[in-house]
Amino acid sequence: MMLYELRRLKKVYDNRTVLDIEDLTLEKGQVTGLLGPNGAGKTTLLKILTFILEPSSGEIRFKGKRVDFAGGNLIDLRRKVVLVQQQPILFTSTVANNVVFPLRIRKIEKTEREHLVEELLELVGMLSFRDAMAHRLSGGETQRVAIARALACFPEVILMDEPTANVDVENQIVIERIIGEINQKKEISVIFTTHNMIQASRLAEKTVFLFEGRVA
């Protein structure tokens, strides 16, 4: 099943075209790597795929249905996808409180919340940090907690902007493992951006190369 279908999609800022995608399809259930240099349009594309940013023109379909950015169904769509930023911001509280936040919003019962927090922190290798203050974590640890918090939203798709860009080698290895486990164990579609061609080929079933806003 096709997850996303993009047709003649453009995004223009101040008369400058930053994205110009004639035709792109991304399959459900895959790990997809978006590869390209700085300024290629990768982050802009991620924001469009998370329905945060409206394209200037063209069409985007999600699971076969046309996305109407002017309509009222964007909130429902945004519940199905989640974006982990390159430099995520955590609440000035404990690691556990950061991960439990989306579960509280969804009014999940307390015992179930505690179980899910433990399970998600275990998945990202941060269970021993559950009572640590989140703002004191390293870049790699912050990224892993942000991934756990994103998973607490029960997304169908998780998008990651340069997930290993600001982390040491040890955390890079862990985050790459997490990407594989999210896809295989949780059956969540993963789309991530990277500069690293070797990383993209190692992790992704499909690699899309962007250059100057176009699919190369």
Image (cartoon, rainbow, N blue to C red):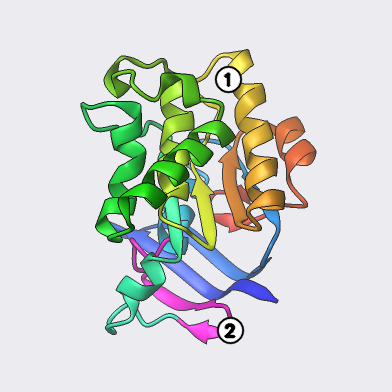
Range drawn in magenta: 50-66
Query: In the picture shown, does residue 141 fall above or below 40?
Result: above
Q: Residues within 10 Å of mark 1 (few under 14, many from 20)?
A: some
Q: Nearer the viewer, residue 113 or 9?
A: 113
Q: Which residue is mark 2?
A: 64
Q: Which mark is residue 171?
A: 1
Compared across the picture, whether 143 is left or right of 101 comes to right
Quadrant where the N terminus lies?
bottom right
Query: In the picture shown, does residue 9 fall above or below 66?
Result: above
For image coordinates 62% across by 47% down, the residue present is 182
Position in image of residue 87 (x %, y %): 38, 31
Position in image of residue 141 (x %, y %): 46, 22
For image coordinates 54% across by 59% down, the residue present is 157
Q: Secondary structure at mark 1?
A: helix
Compared across the picture, whether 19 is left or right of 91 comes to right
For image coordinates 63% across by 36% down, the residue present is 178
Q: Is residue 154 visible?
A: yes
Position in image of residue 126 (x %, y %): 49, 25
Residue kind at label 1, given as amino acid type:
Asn
Magenta-drawn stretch contains 171: no
Residue kind at label 2, given as amino acid type:
Gly
Quadrant where the C terminus lies?
bottom right
Q: Residues within 10 Å of mark 2 (few under 14, many from 20)?
A: few
